[in-house]
Image (cartoon, helix red, strand yellow):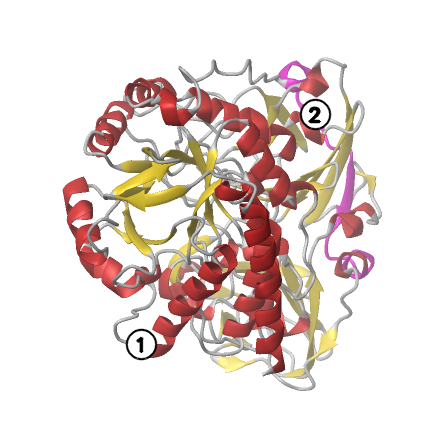
């Protein structure tokens, strides 16, 4: 009860500030006569999705102005809960996490903001934006009014509201709409599950209390009535809209049944000019001509629209997610979130599979629907100059002359950082969230109680989450990947004697971010290692978190690469000096010839690479330079190039491209 009183008091404070500020402004954004109304005039929302968490802060304004130049009048963005509260109760709203600064820059660029506040977001983002610490005591019901999820989610909503309410449009800010949850009808069903209905109702009531009637609240689901019925609230408490909407008429009919007369403003909250891509797939590439034609179908019927994505950016660090139904059904997303968008990952124009400029094709459509009275100027502004790219060092190959073994005892201690090894006290290996291992790798070791001979048939009690290297006495026996059924059984290359060490390095490749595959997305091992269909006998398992923080990598001991005895996995490093002109240009790191791993530039994790493709390059934006120096660190897990070299190029490369 005391927690409820605290929440109510906080809401009163927020409301008081809102009402006081509202006396100073006369701006409004409402729904009337089945239209969006901005300051009393009908307006079509022509939005583009861009996630501030996927774009360097130094480029926020540049990308917003490019969207504005395309004829857009709004930006839609997700707020990833786990990005801002990576550790329970520790909030970050500074630097790349400064959503207030992003909202100010959007407003300065002449853009309204459609804010998607979650708590769940999807977005091909790790765990759909939910924090991994929710799983520290095992799996729990998600996206429901059940505890402990509900209290954690509502606490986050309170923290977020205190950082965004001042940016509402009637108060002089850019936020004109707030989305509640996301595509809930693809996960739950408010018509059948009372706790799920209470969850959505509670989010709506909370945000209605926080913003009063200053801006519309809405939900979005698949562009059909069945999805909307499962995921939204029929009636006037929240606007129900659709995404996808291959046939806009079906969307409009469904929205008309969900929303009362007069409140049936048409809106496709996600219109797809491109699509997502998983490792091992062909890069998504759609027709520019068809995309533009479909966009005009929506706009010509007084439909508002959001391009998902207008600019995708990059899933830096460990933030890329995955799709699938769980267990062996698993598809990890690539690092690039280019999304085949009209504004590419590096900021230049995207091109469709028909060879046409997708930016120009959509610009031609949006210019037809530009309205100077509500869009803020007679015409959209010119596109900013650039972006500017360089094939750093003229494309010459760069030798990584230093290395550090990943799995030496010194390296394990260093990489564990503040995580000490945990002995499971005789239990079998367990998922790692309970030990505070949320991202990166986990290292399982045991000293065998009964030796094994070579040729043993090795397997795991359950599929690894997600990719496990198995070692006997330091020798790699093989790799089991949850999505590769052919890898599930490995023949041991050599044996182990009593008291010898068996070890497994388990890579977390991103938690599933959509539908019920999220329900059990714990990481690490979910059971023992088997030899010839029986659990190996150990004196006890130890589990060590390897979060691979930049601080821990800085403290690794490197030696010259040409020294004998190097083995994988290993880190490779070099320092690159560049001319004054080159450091002000973006570039792309070409990892062709390497196997699978991660890359850091000046302590920033660019993301994953993998020979499975289609992504061959990693985007290196100019702001990552530190003076004239670029420290490059590569973690290779499987098979590095024999010459230990990389190169920089002036464009993104996906499989099949040059």
Q: In this view, does 319 lie to the left or right of 274?
A: right
Closest to the observer, 569 or 423: 423
Query: Which residue is rendered at x = 38% and y = 27% of the image?
Result: 374
397 drawn magenta: yes
Tell me which segment is drawn in magenta.
Answer: 392-413
Dots 1 and 2: beta carbons under 8 Å? no
Q: Is residue 193 left or right of residue 108?
A: left
Q: Position of residue 190 (x, y in %)?
A: 30, 70
Closest to the observer, 478 or 327: 327
Vertical placement of residue 385 versus 103, above or below: above
Q: In this view, does 521 lie to the left or right of 250?
A: right
* Quarter of the view holding residue 292: top left
Q: Is residue 123 left or right of residue 104?
A: left
Q: Residue 398 carries which label?
A: 2
**Disc 2: CA contacts within 10 A as few (<14), some (14-19) or many (>=20):** some
Of the 4 image quadrants, the one containing the N terminus is bottom right
388 drawn magenta: no
Query: Which residue is rendered at x = 51% and y = 41% of the image?
Result: 51
* Quarter of the view holding residue 258: bottom left
Front tag of 1 and 2? 1
> Mark 2 or mark 1, which is nearer the start of the sequence?
1
The answer to whether residue 25 shows anywhere in this view is yes
Name the residue tied to disc 1: 193
**Disc 1: CA contacts within 10 A as few (<14), some (14-19) or many (>=20):** few
Name the residue furthest bottom: 426
Q: Position of residue 207 (x, y in %)?
A: 47, 59
The answer to whether residue 160 shows anywhere in this view is no
Name the residue furthest front: 23
Q: Which mark is residue 371?
A: none
* Quarter of the view holding residue 646: top right
Closest to the observer, 88 or 467: 88
Q: Position of residue 470 (x, y in %)?
A: 59, 63
């Amino acid at each position: 009860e005391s927690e409820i009183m605290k929440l109510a008091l906080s809401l009163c404070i927020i409301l008081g500030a809102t009402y006081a500020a509202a006396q100073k402004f006369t701006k409004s954004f409402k729904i009337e006569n089945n239209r969006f109304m901005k300051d009393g005039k009908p307006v079509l929302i022509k939005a583009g999705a861009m996630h501030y968490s996927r774009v360097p802060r130094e480029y926020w304004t540049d990308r917003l102005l490019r969207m504005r130049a395309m004829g857009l009048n709004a930006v839609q963005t997700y707020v990833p809960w786990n990005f801002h509260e990576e550790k329970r109760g520790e909030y970050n709203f500074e630097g790349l996490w400064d959503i207030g600064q992003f909202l100010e820059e959007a407003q300065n660029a002449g853009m309204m903001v459609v804010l998607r506040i979650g708590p769940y977001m999807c977005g091909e983002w790790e765990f759909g934006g939910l924090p991994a610490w929710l799983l520290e005591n095992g799996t729990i019901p998600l996206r429901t009014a059940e505890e402990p999820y509900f209290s954690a989610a509502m606490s986050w909503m309170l923290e977020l509201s205190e950082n965004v309410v001042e940016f509402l449009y009637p108060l002089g800010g850019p936020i004109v709409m707030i989305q509640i949850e996301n595509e809930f009808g693809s996960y739950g069903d408010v018509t059948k599950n009372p706790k799920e209905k209470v969850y959505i109702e509670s989010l709506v009531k909370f945000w209605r209390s926080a913003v009063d009637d200053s801006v519309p609240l809405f939900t979005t689901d698949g562009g059909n009535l069945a999805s909307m019925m499962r995921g939204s609230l029929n009636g006037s408490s929240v606007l129900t809209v659709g995404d996808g909407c291959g046939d806009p008429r079906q969307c409009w009919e469904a929205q008309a049944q969900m929303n009362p007369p007069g409140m049936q403003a048409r809106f496709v909250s996600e219109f797809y000019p491109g699509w997502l891509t998983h490792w091992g797939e062909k890069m998504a590439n759609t027709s520019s001509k068809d995309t533009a034609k479909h966009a005009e179908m929506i706009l010509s019927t007084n439909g508002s629209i959001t391009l998902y994505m207008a600019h995708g950016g990059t899933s830096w660090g460990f933030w890329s997610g995955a799709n699938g139904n769980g267990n062996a059904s698993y598809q990890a997303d690539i690092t690039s979130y280019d999304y085949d968008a009209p504004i590419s990952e590096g900021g230049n124009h995207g091109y469709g599979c028909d060879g046409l400029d997708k930016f120009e094709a959509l610009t031609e459509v949006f210019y037809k629907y530009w309205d100077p009275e509500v869009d803020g100027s007679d015409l959209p502004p010119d596109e900013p100059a650039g972006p500017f790219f360089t094939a750093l060092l003229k494309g010459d190959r760069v030798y990584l002359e230093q290395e550090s073994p990943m799995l030496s005892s010194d390296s394990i201690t260093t990489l564990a950082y503040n995580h000490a090894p945990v002995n499971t006290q005789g239990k079998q290996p367990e998922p790692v969230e309970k030990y505070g291992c949320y991202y990166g790798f986990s290292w399982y070791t045991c000293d065998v109680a009964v030796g094994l001979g070579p040729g043993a048939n090795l397997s795991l009690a359950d599929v690894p989450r997600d990719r496990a290297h198995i070692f006997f006495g330091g020798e790699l026996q093989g790799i089991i990947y949850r999505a590769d059924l052919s890898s599930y059984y490995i023949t041991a290359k050599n044996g182990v004697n009593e008291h010898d060490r068996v070890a497994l390095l388990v890579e977390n490749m991103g938690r599933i971010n959509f539908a019920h595959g999220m329900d059990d997305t714990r990481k690490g091992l979910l059971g023992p290692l088997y030899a010839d269909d029986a659990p190996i006998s150990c004196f006890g398992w130890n589990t060590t978190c390897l979060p691979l923080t930049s601080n821990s990598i800085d403290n690794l001991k490197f030696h010259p690469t040409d020294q004998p005895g190097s083995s994988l996995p290993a880190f490779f490093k070099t320092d690159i000096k560049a001319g004054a002109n080159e450091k002000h240009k973006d570039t792309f790191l070409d990892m062709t010839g390497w196997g699978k791993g991660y890359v850091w530039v000046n302590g920033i994790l660019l993301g994953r690479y993998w020979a499975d493709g289609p992504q061959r390059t990693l985007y290196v934006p100019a702001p990552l330079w530190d003076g004239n120096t670029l420290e490059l660190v590569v973690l290779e897990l499987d098979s590095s190039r024999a010459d230990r070299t990389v190169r920089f190029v002036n464009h993104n490369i996906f499989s099949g491209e040059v």
